[in-house]
Amino acid sequence: MKASDLFIKSLEKEGVRFIFGIPGEENLDFLNSLKNSKIRLILTRHEQAAGFMAATYGRLTGKAGVCLSTLGPGATNLVTAAAYAQLGAMPMLMITGQKPIKSSKQGQFQIIDVVEMMKPLTKCTKQIVSGDAIPSRVRESFRIAEEERPGAAHLELPEDIAREEVLSLGTIAPAEVRRPIAEEKSIMRAVELIEESKHPLLLIGAGANRKTTCKMLREFLHKTGIMAFCTQMGKGVIDERDELFLGCASLSSGDFLHRAIEKADLIINVGHDVIEKPPFFMGQSGLKVIHVNFFNAVVDPVYFPQVGVLGDIANSIWQIKEHIKPQKHWDHSFYKKVKRNLEEHLLEKTDDNSFPILPQKLVSEVRQVMPSDGIVALDNGVYKIWFARNYKAHLPNTVLLDNALASMGAGLPSAMGAYLVYPDRKVMAICGDGGFMMNSQELETAVRLKMNLVILVLRDDAYGMIKWKQTDMRFDSFGLDFTNPDFVLYAQSYGAYGHRLEKTEDLAPLIIECYDKKGVHLIEVPIDYSLNDQVLNQEIKEKSQKF
């Protein structure tokens, strides 16, 4: 058996369904072995997009998504996706080719040290130097990528190793592993702090975005009546229509939520780490924090919790819920006032049919047409803040955004990865014109694979997020405007359907029509960001300070 055959069998043992990427000359043995496998090759138009798809697969399934590239430029094109998965805690395995390592006839042509390059961007990176080592290398890479905290792993398969005959024919099955649970003393200390507090508040981060954890958190909230808010990557853990859900901390400061945080004397911080911007700052205020997570807190100038509850998060919340007794002295009245004011504020402009469309109206229309299990994949831009703040997620992992690396260009590939995991759900990519054009070539991939997707391209002919920041910092407008192709014709040139929104009131019916017709539909949506500075900065701060 060839080593490349053994590699594919090892991936099959891991339950791999897809390999995303672009093979090169150095992967041809691997590709030939893949031909006879049930694993499906998703041939993309750029390695970065393949990495984003693999990371999204990992995010949605908990199993490492797999992507493939050749050596040199193929491998360097995976760098951004590696960081995206690593910072976003998405399990992913990258497989790259390499020239023969036992002999070389091409000198240093295309050769860079990919293993060394991947070290700062992954949890583990190895070159395979013996075909017989493949089963253990593959198993170990999956184990490390998938265990808490999940992230990226990398294996380099040189051309001569891939084609060598191997003695070992066996693969290694994944072991059954249960996560450790928190020590009872830490549970009881957490219960004690919560019962002693007067204004407890619960914060939900990305690490809580697990099915069982969601169930436990909802039971905890409804037993105690304690209110909760989330980070951007914690959206959907709690049904955001719930009366105990305060909102999403989508802005760094000055929002209505920050008034609630200032009132809190205890924050129960579940599944959050400082890779996401902390929505509160520990200082001299006397605020106490309970850190509930799989791993200990990384001490930071703004984050140094007094109590750590370390272990399986769902079990930790269940234990706390079982021991805790609701207290009469808990006072949630101010939080309820914050919620009323925030909800009233979020309704503003949602009935405004002015054109180009306002962000508040856009979010409202999308929410109305998307079912509870519909998936919205957001690229990175100012619209991400509007969706994080205004879009009510009903279920976990139905709002896919990146607030860790916050890379542009991930929206469309992320939606495509989500579609492959959930082909029966409605999936929508929402991209700015800047971010969309960074990986727009994947339209061809989506059309070729006969996906059913709706892509909203929000057109403002500029890098709008940075223009907003430029305005906020009182700089002159400079260096951030560009021109765009005709997006309707652009989509049609790939075989997709192209649409252009002409009236705001047509958006919801147009989206419904696109889903009914199926296929890949791109809708160009002119958007008016002129209120960004007023609403997201000045107006919110003024209104939130009134109570």
Image (cartoon, rainbow, N blue to C red):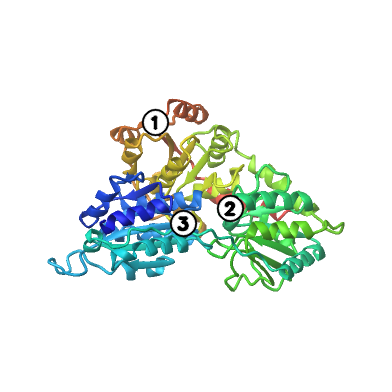
Q: Tell me the residue at 72%/49% (across/down).
A: 219
For label 2, the SS is loop
Helix, strand or loop for disc 1: loop
In the image, 465 versus 95, the foreground residue is 95
Residue located at (63% from left, 40% from top): 348
352 sits left or right of 477 in the view: right
Please tell me the numbered disc located at residue 406.
3
What residue would you read off at disc 1? Answer: 519
| Quarter in which the C terminus is drawn | bottom right
Q: Earlier in the sequence, mark 1 or mark 3?
A: 3
CA gap, disc 1 to disc 3?
28 Å
As rendered, which of 425 and 485 lies closer to the eye?
A: 425
The type of residue carrying mark 1 is: Gly
Q: Is residue 186 left or right of residue 46?
A: right
Instruction: Look at the numbered disc 3 and give the secondary structure of its residue.
Output: loop
Q: Which circle, 1 or 3, is nearer the viewer?
A: 1
Which of marks 3 and 2 precedes in the sequence? 2
Q: Which sits earlier in the primary sequence, circle 1 or circle 2? A: 2
Question: In which quarter of the view is residue 360 placed?
Answer: top right
